[in-house]
Image (cartoon, grey):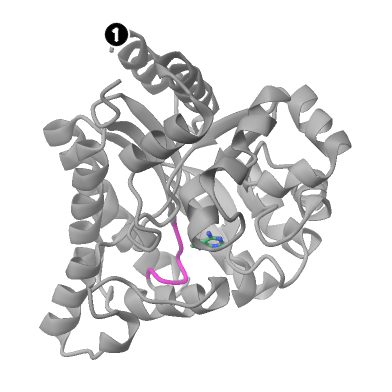
Amino acid sequence: MNSKDFPKVELHLHLEGAAPPSFIRGLAREKGIDISGIFNEAGHYAYTDFWHFLKVYDAATSVLQTPQDYYRLTRAVLEESAANGVIYSETFLSPDFCGGRDVVAWRDYLSAIREAAEEAERKDGIALRAIVTAVRHIGPEASRETAICAAETAGDFLTGFGLAGDEKMHAPKDFVWAFDCAREAGLRLTAHAGEWGGPQSVRDALHDLKVERIGHGVRAIEDLQLVDELAEQGVVLEVCPGSNIALGLYPQWRKHPIAELDRRGVRVTISTDDPPFFHTTMTREHDRLADAFDWDEGQFRTIHRTAARAAFCDEATRDKILSRLEDA
Ligand code: ADE
Ligand code: ZN
């Protein structure tokens, strides 16, 4: 199988987290900002653990200051995704970074990102939808403003609402207002859980926030009753194996629970999370999974069909993605 050209659907990608280090360095130079401390000698992002990663992420993001910066970022990210065979992508956006949760400013950022997405669709054949994401460690109060930004701009491009950030801070129930607001605006829901928190964190996200997808969710494997519940309810996991391995959640690819979750009937999908931070691409994820679990083209096709069915997009777009998966 040519894993680079194989058509892929990616449901879990943080737009700032996908910024190539060279792109961030270039913007920093243009603006006269010194963020040299976040890179190692080879020019890669350097961090020691997940919590340090979040700080480095914020520092890199600090050079993204205008809608035009996000336009350029979106073009760069989608070009790289398309080069790795991604035909449909969903990206997390945070009004915290884009205009400080001000609805008027946020509209300008979202328009710039959408314009870049439409150009990428025409030029590279990759479709993008956006998921507004509240940042857990910024807190529940801010999440209300974030949800209002999302609700005000919900539509055919901005189709989802989610929760990312430090899973050890606050509880899903603290974000119920924001998720109710997003749901009432017609947005589809997902939340990061079961990455730094265990099975109870996944249960809480499902029961309190009533999400249909879980970001990561891999630590559900520590409770087989929960695994059965996920399988029975058809909850889709946005699994990011290379991210989990780079951040030390699992020591090696063979120890990653994605294959066991799949065997037990859970709907798993494959994403990169923050690819340059984790030295990965969608191509590399496929190569490593094929090596670790002997997965063949049929297995990957099934997984991308699952992702297409779980995508937060309109039915015409879904049909188009599904037929591109079948034709390949
Ligand atoms: N934000 C960016 N990447 C993240 C991750 N892997 N977990 C939680 N929040 C994030
Ligand atoms: Zn993530």
Residue 187 seen in render: no
Q: Main secondary structure of the magenta part?
A: loop
Residue 71 in which image quadrant: bottom left
Foreground of the two, 285 or 238:
285
Residue plotted at (79% across, 23% down): 232
**Residue 96, magenta (yes or no):** yes
Residue 280 in the image: state x and y as whole percent: 35, 51
Secondary element type, mark 1: helix
Does residue 235 appear left or right of residue 246 in this picture?
right
Report which residue position mark 1 lands on: 327
Residue 168 in the image: state x and y as whole percent: 72, 70
Q: Quadrant of the N terminus?
A: top left
Foreground of the two, 268 or 164:
268
Residue 301 in the image: state x and y as whole percent: 43, 18
Does residue 272 appear left or right of residue 139 in this picture?
left
Residue 324 in which image quadrant: top left
Q: Is mark 1 within 8 Å of ligand 2?
A: no
Foreground of the two, 155 or 10:
10
Residue plotted at (54% across, 50% down): 252
Does residue 246 appear left or right of residue 173 in this picture?
left
Q: Which residues are magenta?
A: 93-98
Residue plotted at (28% across, 53% down): 113
Crowding at dot 1, Cα within 10 Å, few <14 / some 14-19 / many 20+, comes out as few
Q: Amino acid at mark 1?
A: Asp
Does residue 47 appear left or right of residue 113 in this picture?
right
Residue 150 in the image: state x and y as whole percent: 51, 54
